[in-house]
Image (cartoon, grey):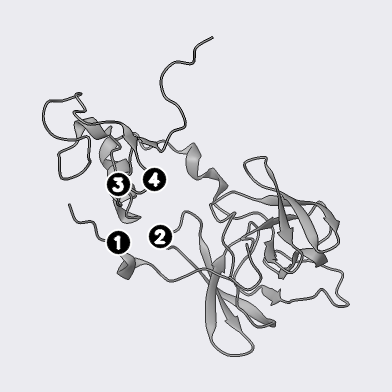
Amino acid sequence: MTYRSPSFRFEGVAKHTLLPTAGTVVDIVHCAGHTAPLIEVSYLTGGSGLSFAPEGIKVGDAITVSNSRGDSTVLKMGDVLALKDIPEGTLIHNIELSPGDGGKIVRASGTFAKVLAKSEGVVKVLLPSKKEKDFQADCRAAIGTIAGAGRLEKPFLKAGTRYMRMRARNKLYPHVCGISMNAVDHPFGGKCSHIKGRPTQSPRSAPPGRKVGKIAPRRTGRRKV
């Protein structure tokens, strides 16, 4: 089966601009490809870009994108700074995994991370999963909590509503087990229902599409006491 991503309906890529600059929020937009609302920022250097909307931001607010904190001591929602310049205990989002990549994690609606501690060249951050991760001190992040925290509070009520929501974001729904699929959709599919007909262990060198089940397991079966 062939799947297509409806990227022509997406507003664009939400990421930090590479050059230090300042800008003004000109619009708050909805993108089918993101769970959180986005803001369109017009930069002083020319052009515009998309970023995640933090809670409390509105059209007309000014944000700053900087590689260093400088003399400013006031942090505003939506400002982008290096982790080494963000005070401990500050809530952040859209964190870069490597300096300059535009932000890769903590991008879902209502999520935030917290700066815990800073050392020489390393900043420890508490992620939404309650795990602690070390980042390079030059990695950047935006200040605040991403808007849209109440998204999960409203139930879907109908399966069709959930199906259309998942389809808008190019997500396969509903999720069924592999043995209930057709043979063209999964290696365990086809033949009789709920009978695999082939091993559930897959070698490390298996081609894409066949690497399902247990990937090169060290052991299988019940552990002997």
Q: Identify the image quadrant of residue 53.
A: bottom right
Q: Position of residue 66 (x, y in %)?
A: 73, 77
Type of the residue with mark 2: Gly
Which is in the foreground here, disc 3 or disc 2? Answer: 3
Residue type, mark 3 in image: Leu
- Of the numbered discs 2 and 1, the one sitting upstream in the chain is 1
Vertical side of 189 occupied by 35: above or below: below
* Residue on which the image places disc 3: 172
For marks 4 and 2 on the same chain, the one whose residue lies earlier in the sequence: 2
Q: Amino acid at mark 4?
A: Arg
**Front residue of this view, candidates 149 and 206:** 206
User: Hey, what amino acid is under mark 1?
Assistant: Ser
Residue annotated with mark 1:
5
Q: CA distance from mark 4 to mark 1?
A: 28 Å
Of marks 2 and 1, the one in the foreground: 1
Q: CA distance from mark 4 to mark 2?
A: 32 Å
Q: Which residue is mark 2?
A: 33
The quadrant in which the C terminus is found is top right
Q: Name, please, the residue furthest toward the left.
A: 191
Relative to the observer, which residue lies in front, 101 or 170?
Answer: 101
Q: List x then y, in percent, for residue 169.
A: 35, 55
Q: Is residue 129 left or right of residue 38?
A: right
What residue sits 17% from the left and 52% below the top?
1
210 and 149: which is toward the camera = 210
On the picture, is 38 further left or further right than 19? left
Q: CA distance from mark 3 to mark 2?
A: 14 Å
Mark 3 vs 2: CB contact within 8 A: no
